[in-house]
Image: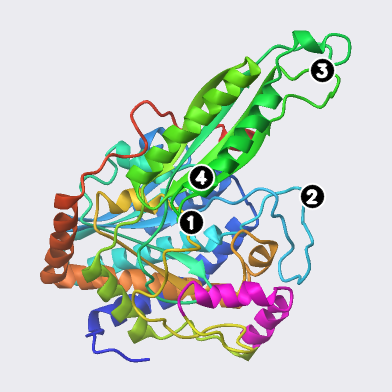
Amino acid sequence: MSSSKDASNSKEVWRRIDDKAPEYFALSDRIWHMPELNYQEVRSAAEHRAMLEREGFRITENVAGLPTALIGEAGEDGPVIAIMGEYDALPGLSQEAGVTAASPVEKGGNGHGCGHNMLGAASLLAAAAVKDYLAANGLKGRVRYYGCPAEEGGSAKGFMVRAGAFDDVDIALCWHPASFSGVSRPFSLACVEVEFTFTGRASHAAAAPHLGRSALDAVELMHIGVNYMREHMPSTARVHYAVINAGGIAPNVVQATATTRQLIRAATLSEMWDLVARVKKIAEGAALMTETQVAARQLSGDANLVGNRPLEEAMHANLQALGGPGFDAADHAFAAGFQKTLSAEDIAASYARLGLAPRQGEALNDEIYPLGAGSDTSVGSTDVGTVSWVVPTVQCRTACYAVGTPGHSWQLVAQGLAPAAHKGLALAAKAMAGVAADVLNDPALLAAAKDAFAAFRAQNPFANPITDDVEPPLDMAAH
């Protein structure tokens, strides 16, 4: 594909990415082999730190009091460009690479089912290329790699925003692995994660059940109440739950404590907080019905995404100038094997999320989809949303795996070391680095991005969903 974009500056930074890419493919693969959960990414963060040190970045660790958060900075003066990376994995998704059937490496183990092994590597690759580009051309400007842990429900970026880590940033860039490549509509759900712990009274469930007050009963009644609420909330809202503590494994003991974790999502922060208040009332009702007590603890929270049209147009122009990832016949054959494990519904839904017509027999997509494609349904949440409320932010997606591959699946984990994943990683790095080069060389683009951001914020006040009383849930992966 071609574009009217003047790619002369971008081409220079793209060449630097080509030169460095093999080292970062290896970084992605190493992170894949050490999947670590929210706030436990000790080895993964160390790998990123080592690469930052090798590249000559100035490094800050323990950002916002988060042991696995770090920043690497290079350059002097000028605009500050943040490139955000992630490296957390998901529980229960351990999977052998390249195997087209569920085959855990470790039973019950973790796996990179959202591609964050690629995400962090590509972002650091982009930052390293921009660093060298600044130095080679004597340009004023600073590039920062933000190593952000715990995107999967831990909201690390929200804690980093609260701590002021983005206060002097001019623009923020990021990406995510996907089945398609492009700049989609900037829409995500605001969310908050809250644990409700019920405390009752233990007793012998047969000899003296009347003396017990079951915390597990309270959890079950709360879930019923939330399920009834679903009919009476906005169509884009979502509520999910997990029982974190069921009170033990002995059915002949009335459970004295039990905990449920509720993830509450809505299209806007105000809608979300309204739902949170309703869920809390349901919890209080369940406690009243069971004569137990309930305590709520907020773990995390993400704002909904805010778009920035000038930056989106710049990133789209870079992607058009680059074209797709450049998959070959071997890539297509590999992806076709995984596509056979998917349902027709999985594949159709993948196209539908972007408003695209399904294509029969397309295992990998090698095009750039239209700017702004996407819908307000079938979307999740991301802590990038919180950053987008305080800094002009843009993100792209690039094709790294078979069309139809569900997020958070063993199929995605199994494709994480493939050449196709590396090609999508490199495309994302080039798109981000290209936008950085555009901003560094075109003050008008930076001004337009800031003007669009300021116009939005003038009409939309912001309060970080990570309030001052919320402590980072460094233990959330321990359950």
Q: How is the image coloured?
A: rainbow
User: Which circle, 3 or 4, is nearer the viewer?
Assistant: 3
Position of the C terminus by quadrant? top right
**Looking at the image, do the residues carrying marks 1 and 4 touch, with CB atoms under 8 Å apart?**
no
* N-term-proximal mark, 4 vs 2: 2
Residue position for label 4? 153
Q: Is residue 78 visible?
A: no
Q: Which amino acid, by three-letter code, is at mark 1?
A: Gly
Residue position for label 1? 380
Residue 253 shows which numbered tag?
Answer: 3
Position of the N terminus by quadrant? bottom left
Residue drawn at 37 percent across, 72 percent down:
183
Residue 353 shows which numbered tag?
Answer: none
Is 41 in front, or is 463? 463
Q: Secondary structure at mark 3?
A: loop
Residue position for label 2? 107
Left or right, 223 with reference to 71? right
